C-alpha cells in the first residue's frame, strides 16, 4: 500500500499485477490440464461419453493437484534457501564482529605492554 496526497492508502500496483499474474498462471494451468485430459480420453475410443467426461474430470483434477503439490514444494525449497542465506549472513556478521573484537583486544594488549 502507498499513501496518496490525501493521506489515504492507495492500493499497491505491484500487488495487483501479481494477483493478475497468479490468475493468468492458474487459468493457463487449468487449460493445459484440461487439454491433456482430453488428449488422453481421445486415445481411448471405447469410452462412452459419460466415461469420457468422468475421465477428463478426474484427470484434470489430478493434474491440477499435482501442479499445486509441485508449487508448494518449490515454495518450501525457496523458503528453506532464504533461511539458509539469512543464517549464512548472520554467521558472517558474527565472525566479523569476533575478528574485530580480537584485533581490538590484541591492539589494546600491545599498546598496554609498550607503555
Image (cartoon, rainbow, N blue to C red):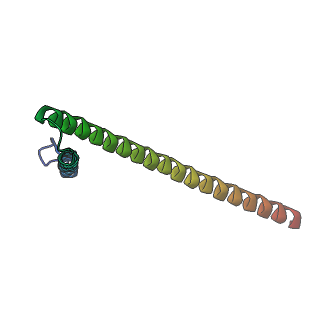
From this viewpoint, which residue is outermost toward the front?
46
From this viewpoint, which residue is outermost toward the bottom?
114
- Residue at the spot 88% in from the left edge and 63% down from the top edge: 113
Image quarter hosting the C terminus: bottom right
* Left or right relative to 105: residue 89: left
- Residue at the spot 31% in from the left edge and 38% down from the top edge: 65
In this rendered view, identify the residue nearer to me: 36 or 20: 36
In this rendered view, identify the residue nearer to me: 102 or 90: 90
In this rendering, the count of numbered labels is 0
* Left or right relative to 85: residue 95: right
Q: Position of residue 75 (x, y in %)?
A: 40, 46
- Residue at the spot 47% in from the left edge and 50% down from the top edge: 82
- Residue at the spot 13% in from the left edge and 32% down from the top edge: 50
In this rendered view, identify the residue nearer to me: 56 or 67: 56
Image quarter hosting the N terminus: top left
Q: Position of residue 98 (x, y in %)?
A: 70, 55
Q: Quadrant of residue 96?
A: bottom right
Q: Position of residue 110 (x, y in %)?
A: 83, 65
Q: Position of residue 101 (x, y in %)?
A: 71, 56
In this rendered view, identify the residue nearer to me: 11 or 97: 11
Amino acid at each position: 500500500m502507498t499513501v496518496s496526497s490525501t493521506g489515504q492508502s492507495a492500493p499497491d500496483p505491484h500487488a495487483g499485477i501479481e494477483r493478475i499474474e497468479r490468475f493468468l498462471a492458474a487459468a493457463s494451468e487449468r487449460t493445459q490440464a484440461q487439454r491433456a485430459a482430453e488428449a488422453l480420453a481421445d486415445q481411448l475410443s471405447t469410452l462412452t461419453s459419460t466415461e469420457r467426461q468422468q475421465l477428463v474430470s478426474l484427470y484434470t483434477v489430478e493434474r491440477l493437484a499435482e501442479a499445486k503439490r509441485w508449487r508448494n514444494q518449490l515454495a518450501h525449497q525457496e523458503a528453506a534457501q532464504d533461511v539458509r542465506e539469512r543464517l549464512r549472513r548472520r554467521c558472517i556478521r558474527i565472525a566479523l564482529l569476533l575478528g574485530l573484537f580480537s584485533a581490538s583486544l590484541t591492539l589494546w594488549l600491545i599498546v598496554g605492554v609498550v607503555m
